[in-house]
Image (cartoon, rainbow, N blue to C red):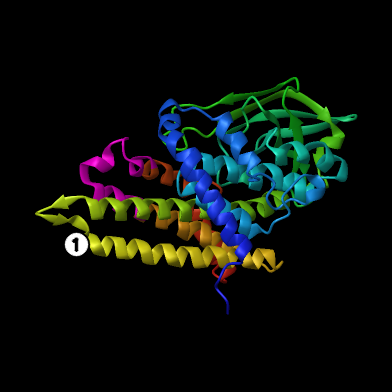
């Protein structure tokens, strides 16, 4: 067994880490304070090749493996969760469904601009009354001649209401299956389509400089050719998309945990009480040791899941495990980091305050921690309802 990364992976890590430190860190706190999505840093991330990482060069992508993408998200998250969310959501949820399920015409139409960073794309899944129970979507699409007529709403959709968002993929109920369950399909809706409105959401606790939107569809008509893949295949597409997305959320947890650890070690070695650095006190040293151990475990679990995906092996169970564990590791690391900073950890002047807030979404988005445990339980043979 060889646990070393390739030279290409190491070069990528150093490149993205340097970018995050030099371009994102100086502006992250201010952007968070103002709840401002930065088109400037977003474009710089695009120039670095952080969009379409795993997409074929044929469509403007970087043609790298999934582990490369995960390493990139990890390194961005090590500095700021909002920027990492922009990258993760755009690749996994925006670009992914189009790349894996789109027709050749759809790929050529949308992917080049998305991979270059000229445009963004959202994935409309969650609804006000359909979160974990996504199959209970109330948004409907009825085929009327050569057009789909869409009605409904979505909420908490990343990258869906920027000035460069070119559209969204919408999960909608398009009928009923033979067994009586709803037939779900994914449909592409371009920005500017009459009847489609995207509104930015503000007042968030976390990812404050990431774009989050509410989507509304009122008699919204799109061509029937905007169907993504076969009709009724939406649930399968959604589940496959979430499997890959869980790896990126795990990467955000891993990177965020590493960022918390880095800051905690530095502060604990600089801060003195009772005449010596607080890192020399066993209670604090043990916190740092626990953080280091859990981060190492999280990285091994996540990278193994990526290896399974890159080798075309089944990885759904491992994706759920990685998402669950990395999210909860970041929670524990953020908690320790704030505790080690004492009162300063509660002040926005220190990054650990932002990391502490940003962490919570990881236990909720793309399948809550509770849902991940259900997924894992089913995989191991437990009859979990």
Name the secondary structure under disc 1. Answer: helix
Please tell me whether residue 156 belongs to the stretch shown in magenta: no
The quadrant of the rendering that contains the N terminus is bottom right
Q: Residue 351 at what x, y percent from top left?
A: 36, 41
Q: Position of 14 compared to 230: left or right? A: left
Residue drawn at 38 percent across, 40 percent down:
354
Instruction: Give the quarter of the image for residue 327.
Output: bottom left
What residue is shown with label 1?
280
Q: Main secondary structure of the magenta part?
A: helix
The quadrant of the rendering that contains the C terminus is bottom right
Q: Residue furthest left?
A: 274
Residue drawn at 90 percent across, 29 percent down:
145
Which residue is nearer to you in this view: 144 or 196? 196
Q: Residue furthest top?
A: 194
Q: Crowding at label 1, few (<14), some or many (≥20) Cα neighbours within 10 Å?
A: few
Q: Is residue 71 above or below residue 99?
A: below
Q: Which residues are magenta?
A: 333-354
């Amino acid at each position: 067994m060889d646990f070393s990364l390739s030279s290409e992976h190491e070069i990528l890590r150093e490149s993205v880490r340097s970018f995050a430190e030099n371009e994102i860190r100086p502006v992250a706190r201010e952007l968070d304070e103002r709840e401002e999505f930065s088109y400037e840093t977003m474009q710089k991330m695009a120039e670095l090749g952080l969009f379409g990482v795993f997409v074929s060069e044929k469509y403007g992508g970087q043609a790298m493996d999934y582990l490369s993408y995960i390493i990139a998200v990890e390194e961005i998250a090590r500095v700021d969760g909002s920027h990492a969310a922009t990258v993760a959501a755009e690749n996994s949820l925006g670009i992914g469904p189009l790349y894996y399920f789109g027709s050749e015409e759809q790929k050529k139409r949308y992917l080049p601009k998305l991979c270059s960073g000229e445009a963004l794309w959202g994935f409309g899944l969650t609804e006000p009354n359909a979160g974990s129970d996504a199959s209970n979507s109330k948004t409907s699409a009825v085929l009327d001649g050569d057009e789909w007529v869409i009605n409904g709403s979505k909420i908490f959709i990343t990258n869906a209401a920027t000035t460069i968002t070119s559209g969204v993929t919408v999960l909608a109920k398009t009928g009923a299956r033979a067994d009586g369950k709803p037939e779900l399909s994914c449909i592409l809706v371009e920005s500017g389509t009459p009847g489609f409105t995207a509104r930015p959401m503000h007042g968030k606790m976390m990812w404050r400089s990431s774009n989050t939107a509410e989507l509304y569809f009122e008699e919204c008509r799109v061509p029937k050719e905007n169907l993504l893949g076969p009709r009724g295949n939406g649930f399968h597409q959604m589940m496959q998309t979430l499997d890959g997305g869980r790896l990126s959320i795990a990467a955000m947890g891993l990177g965020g945990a590493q960022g918390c650890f880095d800051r905690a070690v530095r502060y604990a070695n600089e801060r003195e009480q009772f005449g010596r650095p607080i890192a020399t006190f066993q209670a604090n040293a043990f916190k740092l040791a626990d953080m280091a151990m859990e981060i190492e475990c999280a990285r091994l679990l996540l990278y193994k899941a990526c290896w399974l995906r890159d080798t075309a092996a089944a990885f759904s169970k491992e994706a759920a495990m990685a998402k669950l564990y990395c999210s909860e590791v970041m929670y524990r690391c953020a908690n320790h980091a704030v505790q080690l900073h004492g009162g300063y950890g509660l002040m926005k002047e220190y990054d650990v305050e932002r990391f502490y807030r940003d962490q919570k979404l990881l236990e909720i988005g793309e399948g809550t921690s509770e849902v991940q445990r259900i997924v894992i339980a089913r995989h191991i043979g437990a009859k979990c309802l």
